[in-house]
Amino acid sequence: MTQQKGAVWYEHLHTEKHTGARRGRIHTPHGTFETPMFMPVGTQGAVKGVNNKTLKEIGSQFILANTYHLWVRPGDELIAEAGGLHKYMGWDQAILTDSGGFQVFSLSDSRKLDESGATFRNHVNGDKMFLSPEVAMRIQNNLGSDVMMQLDEAIPYFETYDYIKDSMQRSLRWADRAQQYHKKTDTQALFGIVQGAGFRDLRTESAQELVKMDLPGYAVGGLSVGESKVEMNRVLDFTMPLLPEDKPRYLMGVAAPDSLIDSVIRGVDMFDCVLPTRVGRKGTLMTRRGRVVIKNSKYKKDFSPIDPDLEYYSKNPIRTEQFGNLAQYDVPGYSPYQNLSRSYLHHLFNANELLAAEIASEHNLRYLLNLMEEMRTAIENDQLLEFRERVLEEYGYNKE
Ligand code: GUN
């Protein structure tokens, strides 16, 4: 089940006995990383509020950046001149870049879409720009990401069958154009994106045609855009078995703990989402016992730790005595925020301190990266269903 060719390839380690969930590794020019994995989002070449050193310490493997944003500012050619995105942002592990289609649709003005590509005005200075499958590839080649996504059309879930069919088929043609354009297959991998909203025959056509192209990896797009969780699971149930077992499978834009587990159960290896950093900097913590809205007045005098389940701040708790005179925050894997109280974070948010966003963003990523780590262990031990029950119970889903 292992395919060793090209820049990025999947190594399968174990199939969970009861669910078929996959435990594997993705090999890239910037290292080998464990799956299932969650990729923090660094839209503009920076994960908001969390520096690279911290990202590594809390277990980030891949990070995601956005073609659209880096193209608009500072420009892909400037980044190429600087030596590529890894060097520019000082990140020596893997980078995946999204193709820009999704952002063009959510951020830009006066969009016009046809077979050739999308014309729009950018959200920074209003300049007119044209994004095509070839332009998206040229930009991603300049950025030098390990995984590049094909340009696709981001469409609402609840559109008509005919609309979704036309759009999905155009995305297939765009995948073909992206593949024709791509010349750097030894250093960068192009992933295709399965579309088709909730229509089984359209998802099937999309997946089958993309698989024929023999791309090094496949994503499922157009989900987590307002449809229910039951609906998302239904689509994954019939879509995932169509994707090759020897290649990475990526579900775009998902981070809710229950959805992560339910999607891994259906065979997903990779996820990304802005959720942990976005809700974090606005004051919502994701904890093992559910969400904590830290600005709530009930935390004003709550001197308990930010998250009482301290063990997951570090997968290998390191005792300070091992490190002699090092200050706590110099110990690898140890959070400088570990001993802070909810009251303090409540105060920082009320006082609009920058550190508030930093602590909360880091915390939420720690929570999710740790969840993935535990999920990998649960797969290895064939206990994913028990793990799911525990997480859902503790997070409070079962009470909703
Ligand atoms: N991010 C979340 N969903 C999607 C999608 O369908 N396409 C792309 N390109 N990015 C996404």
Image (cartoon, rainbow, N blue to C red):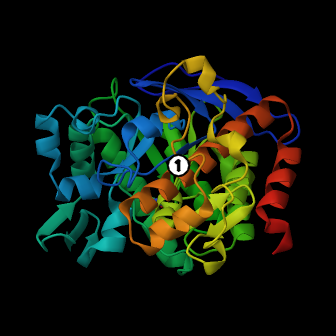
**Considering the numbered disc 1 on the image, is that residue within a helix, a strand or a loop?**
strand
Classed neighbour count for the residue bearing mark 1: other residues with Cα under 10 Å, few (<14), some (14–19), many (≥20): many
Picture coordinates of residue 344 (x, y %)?
Answer: 54, 62
Q: Quadrant of the N terminus?
A: top right
Please state which of residues 128 and 117 is positioned toward the viewer in this rendering. Answer: 128
Name which residue lies at 57% across and 50% down: 207
Q: Quadrant of the C terminus?
A: bottom right
Please state which of residues 107 and 338 is positioned toward the viewer in this rendering. Answer: 338
Q: Is residue 106 above or below residue 148?
A: below
Name which residue lies at 49% across and 31% down: 327
Picture coordinates of residue 269 (x, y %)?
Answer: 62, 41
What is the number of callouts on the image?
1
Q: Is residue 147 visible?
A: no
Q: Quadrant of residue 167?
A: bottom left
Q: Is residue 14 left or right of residue 211?
A: right
Q: Is residue 197 visible?
A: yes
Picture coordinates of residue 335 (x, y %)?
Answer: 54, 41
Q: Which residue is mark 1?
A: 219
Q: Is residue 374 left or right of residue 60?
A: right
Q: Is mark 1 within 8 Å of ligand 1?
A: yes
Q: Quadrant of residue 140?
A: top left
Q: Is residue 344 above or below residue 9?
A: below
Name which residue lies at 56% across and 54% down: 364
Q: Is residue 266 left or right of residue 11?
A: right
Q: Is residue 57 above or below residue 370?
A: above
Q: Is residue 178 left or right of residue 342?
A: left
Name which residue lies at 26% across and 31% down: 183
**View extreme (front): residue:** 325
Disc 1 residue type (three-letter): Ala
